[in-house]
Image (tube, helix red, strand yellow):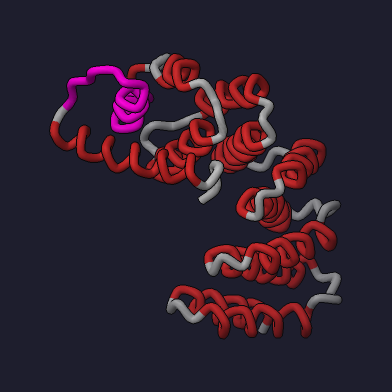
Amino acid sequence: MAKALFIKGLTLRRQERPAAAIEVYDELVGRFGDSEAPAIQEQVAKALFNKGMTRYTQNEYEAAIEAYDEVIKRFLNSDVPDIKNHLFRSIVGKGSSCMELDRPEKALRACEVFKRNYKNMNEETDIELRWRVELIRTKALSRQGDHRAAMNSFSSVYAGFRPTDETMVGLMIAGVFELVATGAQQRGLLDILLMDEEKSAALAPLVVALRKDMGEQVRASAEVMEVAQDIIKKIEGRRASGGRS
């Protein structure tokens, strides 16, 4: 029954019915939250995590943090692999939500909770979650004005960046937007972005945009130049908002 409720909530979310999905997730937690059976605890953890994600996508960041905190409170010491997966994803989600609310100090605390408690699960999950945490940390440090530490952290982000991963590409571009908007040195960013040929190729519009924004004359294909112009506009918008979305 718990699994059926989770699937129902997930289906409603995919149907873009967030309020109905959250009602189902709340029902699941209300009915089964006190169970000590690991299989049922997994469903509770997944429901709370998905509730947090649903709130996040609705720009309800305070409510998202509440859901993520519930996962952390309930399951921080769990040894069940699937529960641990959703626990650490919840910590990452909390960090991202704190950044959206312009709370870099709390985002950094979430990153520290992750690093203190993280236990290896599998290589793919390790790469993804550790990378996301380092990116959040980079943006939070930059938002606080600690640009030297932010650039050191960004070097780690770049080292773990996979140019074939479209999600990573999008997150990397958004991260650089914020670094530039909050005062990071563009020359230093470019030096890092150009360290690997394959990675710089995947980020070609971003590289061109940064160079043009610095006043350099750049040659590139019409397609790359068009995307670069869009990136420049977004960077300017980020600057106007102090680095926030």
Residue at point 15%, 29% (across, down): 221
Position in image of residue 38 (x %, y %)? 78, 65
Position in image of residue 16 (x %, y %)? 45, 77
Residue at point 70%, 43% (across, down): 104
Task: Give the dominant element type of the magenta stretch: helix, strand or loop.
Answer: helix
The residue lying toward the viewer, choosing from 41 and 152, is 152
The residue lying toward the viewer, choosing from 166 and 94, is 94
Residue range in magenta is 198-220
Asked whether residue 38 is drawn in magenta, I would say no
Image quadrant occupied by the N terminus: bottom right
Position in image of residue 95 (x %, y %)? 68, 48
Which of the 4 image quadrants contains residue 25? bottom right
Residue at point 75%, 78% (across, down): 29
Residue at point 21%, 33% (across, down): 225
- Residue 198 appears in the rendering: no
120 lies above or below 83: above
Side of 169 where 40 appears, left or right: right
Side of 158 where 222 appears, left or right: left
4 lies above or below 244: below
4 lies above or below 137: below
